[in-house]
Image (cartoon, rainbow, N blue to C red):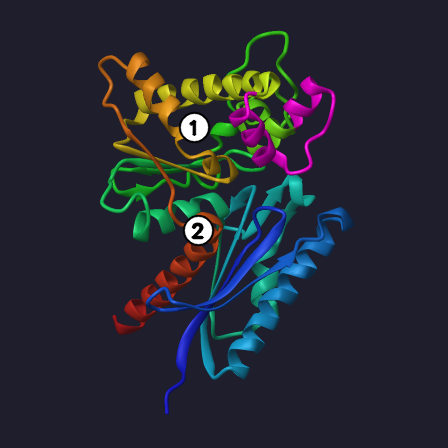
Amino acid sequence: MELSEVVVAVDLGGTRMKCGLVARDSTVVHRETRPTPRAAGGQAVLDALVETVVELGQKAAADGYRVRGVGVVVPGIIDSARGTVRAENLAWLNVGVLDAIRNAVGPGPEVVLAHDVRAGGYAELRGGALVGTTNSLFLPLGTGIAAAMVVDGRLVSGDGFAGEIGHTRFVHTDAAEQCACGQFGCLETVASAAALARRYGDRAGRPVTDGAREVIELLAAGDADAAVVWDEALQALVDAIVLYTTLLAPTRIAIGGGLVGAGETLLRPLRDALAGRLTFQRRPEIVAAVLGEEAGCLGAALMAWDAVANLKEEEAV
């Protein structure tokens, strides 16, 4: 009897790896999370990633599945021609991630390496909040900020560099903070979930224990410091969305990441501000992303299955 087929999918974005075995119809037959040992350095992260891929493959075999592909998505700048990754938050500088995975799994499975946010955007496009769009944006507001851009029906990669809207300067006052990228006043320094928690702690003189979620709760309770950092984050986000809308005219923008947990507290002010700022531009819908933390992992699986399908087409020619 022919074995059921799956792909291994791993999302290395965030503080923990999101992993799964995913069937061709996008059913997740196994899911788990694992720690990402960032504090131990770049080699430790690579070793943990490779070990995870191998062990998920072993899990699939033990459960009676045939592994057809591997999809791994990571933050940073990906050189698709060389299969290398540069990611400061993983302590990777042109690390040969693709070759490491291929050497570990051996011949047979198709291996895909892609950007975590673009993979999340692809999942939202195929089966989430962006279904039916040809010009749209997936904008997760998490530890950092990057974007997945859909332009004229295609997900834009820009040779691995596209979508880094979080590293565009939107704070121009003396209060502009230095970003991890080296610039001052980047969107990520004021409007990411991590920035919201950090800036509230600095302003209030005490750290929050539950990150941006706690700041949102304090905002709802009428905390004045929470209101200030929230309003500053919204202002920068609106500036970024107005710029993107003017340049690329999306019909829908799906907000994801940790801050989308604020719901209409976040989405309604964005809609209202855009209505007041946009004149001739096409006004996009502002909606919540729907796939949550699984978006990147599902996108990795979809990309792996696409690679399997493309291989079959090539073999048939």
Which is nearer the N-term, disc 2 or disc 1? 1
Magenta-tinted stretch:
198-222
Q: Is residue 28 left or right of residue 225?
A: left
Query: What's the CA distance linking mark 2 and mark 1?
Result: 22 Å
| Residue 150 position within the rendered picture, expressed as x and y whole percent measured from the top left | 32, 39
Check disc 2 and report the residue beneath it. 295
Check disc 1 and report the residue beneath it. 265
**What amino acid is at disc 1?**
Thr
Q: Which mark is residue 96?
A: none
**What amino acid is at disc 2?**
Ala
Secondary structure character of the magenta stretch overall: helix
| Residue 157 position within the rendered picture, expressed as x and y whole percent measured from the top left | 41, 41
Mark 2: secondary structure: helix
Q: Nearer the viewer, mark 2 or mark 1?
A: 1
| Residue 314 position within the rendered picture, expressed as x and y whole percent measured from the top left | 31, 67
Q: Quadrant of residue 265?
A: top left
| Disc 2 to disc 1: CB gap under 8 Å | no
